[in-house]
Image (cartoon, rainbow, N blue to C red):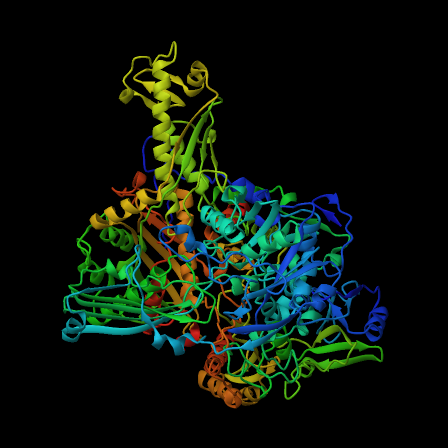
Amino acid sequence: MSIKYAEAEPATTDATKYVGRAVDRIDGPAKTTGEARFAAEYSYPDLAYAALVHATIPRGRITAIDTAAARAVRGVIDVLTHESTPAMKPPPKPSVLDLSSMVAGTSVNYLGTDEVHWNGQPIAVVVAETPETARYAASLVRPAYQELPAATDFEAEKHHAVPQKSSLISEASANKGDAPAALAAAPYAVDLTFSTPPQSHNAIEPHASTAVWDGDRLTLHEGTQNIPWTRRHLALRFGVPEKGIRILSPYVGGGFGGKGSVWAGTLLAVLAARVTGRAVRLALTRESVYHTVGGRTASTQRVALGAEADGRLTALIHTSVSRTGRTGGSGEQITAGSRHLYAAPNIHLQQNVVQLDLLANTFMRAPGESIGTFAMESAVDELAWKLGMDPIELRMRNEPERDPLGGQEFSGRRLREAYALGAERFGWHARDPRAGAMRDGKWLVGMGVATAYHPSLQMMASVTVRLEAAGTLVVRCGLHEMGMGTATVQAQIAADEMGVPLEQVRVEYGDSDLPPGPQAGGSMQTATAAAGVLAACAKLKRTLTGLARRAPGSPLRGTRPADVQARDGGLYAGGRGLTYKELLSAAGRDHVEAEVKGSTLAFMAKFLRERRKWVKAATGAHFCEVRVDPDTMEVRVSRWLGVFDAGTIINARTAASQLRGGIVMGLGMALSEHTLIDPRNGRVVNPSLSEYHLPVHADVPHIDVEWLNEPDPNMPLGLRGIGEVGITGVAAAVANAVRHATGKRVADLPITLDKLL
Amino acid sequence: MKVNGDVAALDVEPWVSLLDALRERLGVTGPKKGCDQGACGACTVLADGVRINSCLALAVQYDGQEITTIEGVDHPLQEAFVRNDGLQCGYCTSGQICSAIGMLAEHAAGMPSAAGGSGALTEDEVRERMSGNLCRCGAYNGIVDAIMEVAR
Amino acid sequence: MKPFAYVKPADVEAALHAAATEPGAKFLGGGTNLVDLMREGIEQPQTVVDVTGLPFDTVEDLPDGGLRIGALVRNSALAADPRVRDRYPVLSQALLSGASGQLRNMATVGGNLLQRTRCLYFYDTTSACNKREPGSGCDALDGFNRSCAILGVSDSCIATHPSDMCVALAALDAVVEVRGTGGTRRVPVTDLHRLPGDTPEIETDLAPGELITAVELPPAPADSRYRKVRDRASYAFALVSVAAALEVSDGTVTLARLALGGIAPKPWRAREAERLLTGGPADEAAFRRAAEAELAAASVRDGNAFKTSLATATIVATLRELSQEGAVR
C-alpha cells in the first residue's frame, strides 16, 4: 500500500493571495550557495579565538589552577580563570516582572567563582591567535580541586523529588474527583511506569559567538532564539547600556530550544573580548556544547487509567519526576497534555522535580509534552489492548466536548476529523488487530497511533512596516530564523495585507537594532509576529488611505475609508484607485511607516483573560508503521502519516517541513537518542554525534503530513504554532506500533533492540 | 591547492584541517563545522571530485588537489533543494549538496552501496548513500526528493 | 591537537626510515581515525609520517585465485572492485556497512586494520582507561558498557575492535603483509590483533615502525555475506556483526567460516562454531548449537548482556539465509 503525498491546497481560492500557498523559502538561495553566514563566519582583522576548559568533577572547589603550560604555547594571548579575571555581574534572579531574567541558562557566574557545580562546567578560557592553538592550549590547563559530595544519579535521587511549583504559565498539578478510588473500582485498568532518558538538541551548528567591543559598545554575532532578552542580559552582566549592544543573528543553524537561553559560551566570548581587547570568536566544540548547554530532563512517569468495559475512562492518573540542575533549569510540564486530552471524571496529575548536581536542564522541542505524551499515549494504547478495543475507537469514546479540568471551550478541536482522515489515508482498516499477526516477508509489521498535542500561545512583538517610494514593503522585526521560514511566512502575510507582490516584500529580522520580536520558542513566534504584522499593516493602510483621500488629484478623494481596499499594489475603491507608487509621489513622501509596539502587560492580561475562556492548542493524529526483524529485533519505521489540526497553514511547503522535522526528532527520541550521563560522576560520556544517535537519512521514510486547515477562531489569521506539535506523540506511536508488531510494551525510551530481545 | 577554481597558496601548520584552512584562513565558510570528527557531514567538500569530510583531512595532505566547496558549485541540485524544501536552518545544506554531487558521481561510476545495488538509484539507495550527512531539522524527505528530481 | 612534524616520504624505504628514526612517529593514511584521536588528545605523535604517497593502492589477482590488496586502497575503491564484489561479497558488504560514503572515500585498508576502539571511556580523557593510560583502571567495567565486548575480555579492558572490514577479513583467512626495516613478514589477520589481557594498550602484533603494506586473500569460499546489527539503519558502529561463508552439500555443511564483530577486542574468528558446523546438518538447530557453543565463554556486564542472545540470533539468521540461498557453487 502506498499513499502519495499531495501538497495541501491553498487556503484561499484567491489567486492573488499568498497565505496558504507552497511558497519557496526566501532564504533558500542564500543557504544553497554558501552565501548565508552564521555566527562563527564573520571575520575581523584582529580576531582571536577562544576555547573552553571544563571541570572534570561534579561538585567542589578549584583549589589551584595551573595555566603555565598553556600560556607557554606560542600564540596564546591570555588564559582567563577565576583568579585572573574580573567577575561579571551576577545573573539576575528570575522574576515575572522582568521576563528577560529567565534567559540565564544557569545561575553560575562563570570565572567569578571557584565553585564547581557540574562535571563539565567551564572553569577557564584560553584566547589565542588560531583556533588550533586555543584548543590545544586549553588541554594543558591543570586545575586542582577539593571535591564535594554530589548527587548525579537520577535513578537514585528521583525518590527525593518534591512537588513542582506551578507557574503563571504552567500548572504542575490537578485534581478532579477521586482518581485513586475510581482506579481501584474500575473494571478495566492499566497502571504503568515509564522512563525517558536525557536528550540533547544537537543542532548541527554548535553554539558560536563572535564578540567585538568598542568602548562600552558591543557587537555580537550570535545564533540565538532570543535576541531581546539576550541583549538585556548581557547589558546587566557587563554593566553597559543596553542600547550600545548590537546582536546580529540572521541565521541560526538549528536551535530547538538549545539557543533559547544565554549559556556559558556567549558570556565567555564577550568576557574574553572585553578582557583581551580583541575581537573574539568562541565556536564551541560539540563536546563543549554538551558540557555547557542544557538538554532535556530524564523523567520517570506513572500513568494509570481506569475504564468501563465500553472504554469510557473513569480514572486518569499521570504523575512525573523530572530533574533540574542545582544551579538552574525548571521542572518540565510533563502532564500538561494530560490536562486536556481525555474526558475522565476523575483526574489526578502531579509533576515532581528533583535537583541534581548536573548542568541545568532546558527547553528542548516540546519540553514536557513530548515525553509526557509518550507515557500517556502508550498507556491509552495498552488500555485498548486490555479492553480488546481499537485504539482509535478508545480515544474517540473519550474525546471531550469541553476541557476536562477547567470546563473551558476548545478554541477549535478536530481530533475526530484528524483520526478519521488519517485512518482512511493510512489504511488503518487493513490492520490485523492481533499482535504479531502482520508480516511482510520476514519482517514483523506493526501499526500504531498516538495523539499530538501542544498549546497555542502568543507573546508580544513590536513591528514596523514601511512602504517605500519604489513600492517595496519593508517589514522590520527582530525575529529569529532557524529553519522555520520566518521571513517567508511573514512576507506572505504582509503581501496579502497590503496587496503587493511577494517579491516586493522585504523582511528584516535577526538584528537587535530592529523593533524587538518575540523569542523563537514555545511555538509562539509565527503567531506573535503575525499579530504584529497584521496590526502594523492595518495602521499603515489607515495612514495611506488618509493620504489617498487628501492627496491632490487622487482618484480616492472623498471615498469612505471603509470602501478602500489594499490590492494590486495600491489602494482601490470600486474601480478607482492608485498604486502605492503614485500615492507616495502624489503625497510627496519617500516612504510611509507604521509601527506597533508589544507590551508585556497587555500580553499578560490577554493571556490570563483568554485562558479562562478557551483552551487553545494544535493537535494531531500520528499513524506509524514499523517493521521489526524477528531475529535481531531491529526496528525500522516504514511509513508515517501525521494529520494535524493546526489552524491556518501559512506556507504549505515550510509547514510540511516543520511538521516533518518534529516527527523526525520524535523518531530519534523513540528509537535511539540518549545522552549518557555517568551516574557515578555526572559526566556526559557520549558528547559526540557519533555516539549520540540522531536519525540519519536511512532511518527516515517518506513522511506524509496533512492538515485540516481550519482557522482557529482566536488566533491571528487563525494560525497555530507548529514548531513543536509534530514531535508530541511520536514516540508513543512508535512504541504502540512496536507493541502491535511484537506483543512487547517498551516503556523506557529509547526503544533499542535489546529491550525487545 | 586549488579552491573553487582559484589557486590558493596556503602556508599552514600540519595540524590545520582542510576545513579550518578553508574557513579560517581562506574565508571560504560554505563548508560547515558541525562535529569536527567525521560524524555529521556538514563539512563535506569535493577533493578532485570525490566527496570527503574536510574536518578529518589535514590540509597538507591535499596539497595540489582541486577542492570544490559549495561556493564553487553551480548545479541543478541547488535549485532543486529550494523547490523541494530540502533544507530548514541551512547549516547542513552545503554538505548535503556537495555530498549529493559526489554521491551521484559515485553511483554513475557503479559504486555499490549497503542498500543493495548499483542499479537504479532508488529512494532507499539515496537514503543509504546520503546517511553520512545529518540534518537535525529533519529535512530528509525534501533532500531525497531534490536528489531524485535531479537524478531523473 | 598537539603540534607535530609532518613528513611525506616518497618511497617505502624512506617511510620506514622515518618511522624508525623520528621519535614518536605514527603513520598516517586517510586520517579518519588518527586525526580525530589527535584532535581529542588521545594520540599525540611527535611526527606524522604520511604514507598516502606510497604505491600500495592497487588490487591485484594472485596466481592461486586470491587477491592482493594494497594497504592504501581506499575503502570505497575496495568495496567497488568487481573482483571483490563477485568473489568476496562479505568483504564488499562489510566495507559498505561501515562509516559513510565520505569516510570510505578517505579511509585506507591499512588504517582500517589499525583503527582504535570507540569505547566511550577511551574517548573521554577524564575517565579511567587502561588502554589510553595504562594502569589508570577501566571505567567501562561498571559504567556504560552496552557497546562493549563479551568475548576475549579481561579485567583491565572490555573495549571492542570497531572495524567491519576486519571481521570479513578474519572470516576469509586474510594474511597481512608487514614491512619493517628488518624486512617483510606475513601475519594472519586473526593473529594481527591482540586480546587485552593486562596490556590493553598493546593492540596488535606490529613492532614499532612496522608498516602494513598489503592484505592477501586466499581463493574465495562459495558464498559469503556480512550482516551488521546496530542502533540505527546506517552510519553507526556494530552492536554485533557476522561475517559468514558456508558451503553445503546434500544438506551437510562442508565448509563454514564465521567471524564476529562488535563483541570482542579483536575481529573474532568463531572457530568453535565452525568446528561444530562442519560436517553437520545445515539446519536451524545446528546453527543455534554452534552459535551458543561459541558464545558459551561470554563474559557479560550489566549493559551488554544482551549481546549474547543478539549474537546468537544474528549468527543463526545469517547462516540460515546463506543456506537457503543454496550456497553451493
Asked if residue C4 can be seen in this view, the reply is yes
Q: Is residue C280 above or below residue C208?
A: below
Identity of the residue drawn at 79% across and 62% down: C53
Residue C179 rendering spot, x and y as whole percentages: 80, 76
Q: Is residue A715 above or below residue B24?
A: above
Asked if residue A16 can be seen in this view, the reply is no
From the viewer's perspective, tell me whether residue A109 is left or right of residue A126: left
Q: Camera-side residue: C153 or C245?
A: C153
Residue C150 rendering spot, x and y as whole percentages: 53, 84
Q: Camera-side residue: C275 or A724?
A: A724
Residue C212 rendering spot, x and y as whole percentages: 75, 74
Residue A183 rendering spot, x and y as whole percentages: 18, 72
Quarter location, residue A393? bottom left
Residue farthest top in this picture? A553
Q: Is residue C225 above or below residue A578?
A: below
From the viewer's perspective, tell me whether residue A313 is left or right of residue C194: left
| Marker count (numbered) | 0
Q: Camera-side residue: A711 or C186?
A: A711
Identity of the residue drawn at 75% across and 61% down: A74
Q: Camera-side residue: A68 or C266?
A: A68
